[in-house]
Image: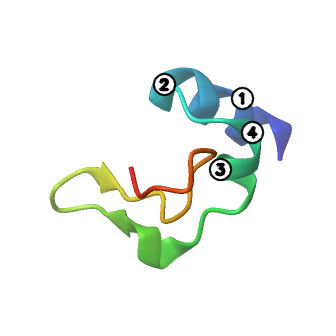
Amino acid sequence: MLQYIVPMLILTGARKQEDLKAKWEDFNFERRLWKIPISKSGKVR
């Protein structure tokens, strides 16, 4: 799985835990958006 996680971290600038806790419903492929519901600061980003 590391071969998928590392490029995603590099391309998105996300933190490791944000990437590991990502769910399919957080992604909007039509708009090419990834909504991170709870970030380190406690806010949606």
Of the numbered discs 4 and 1, the one sitting upstream in the chain is: 1
Residue sitting at 44 percent across and 78 percent down? 25
Residue on which disc 3 sits: 18
Return the residue found at the far right. Answer: 2
Of the numbered discs 2 and 1, the one sitting upstream in the chain is: 1
Q: SS of the residue at dot 4?
A: helix
Drawn side of residue 9 relative to residue 21, left or right: left
Tell me residue 16's x, y (percent): 74, 39
Q: CA distance from mark 3 to mark 2?
A: 13 Å
Q: Nearer the viewer, mark 4 or mark 2?
A: 4
Q: Nearer the viewer, mark 1 or mark 3?
A: 3
Q: SS of the residue at dot 1?
A: helix
Residue on which disc 1 sits: 6
Tell me residue 23's x, y (percent): 58, 72
CA neighbours of label 2 inside 10 A, class few (<14), some (14 to 19), many (20+): few
Return the residue found at the far bottom. Answer: 25
Q: SS of the residue at dot 3?
A: helix
Q: SS of the residue at dot 2?
A: helix
Report if the CB atoms under discs 4 and 2 are less than 8 Å apart.
Answer: no
The circle on residue 16 is 4
Q: CA distance from mark 4 to mark 2?
A: 12 Å
Residue sitting at 48 percent across and 65 percent down? 37
Residue on which disc 2 sits: 11
Of the numbered discs 4 and 2, the one sitting upstream in the chain is: 2
Q: CA distance from mark 1 to mark 3?
A: 12 Å
Return the residue found at the far top. Answer: 10
Q: Amino acid at mark 1?
A: Val
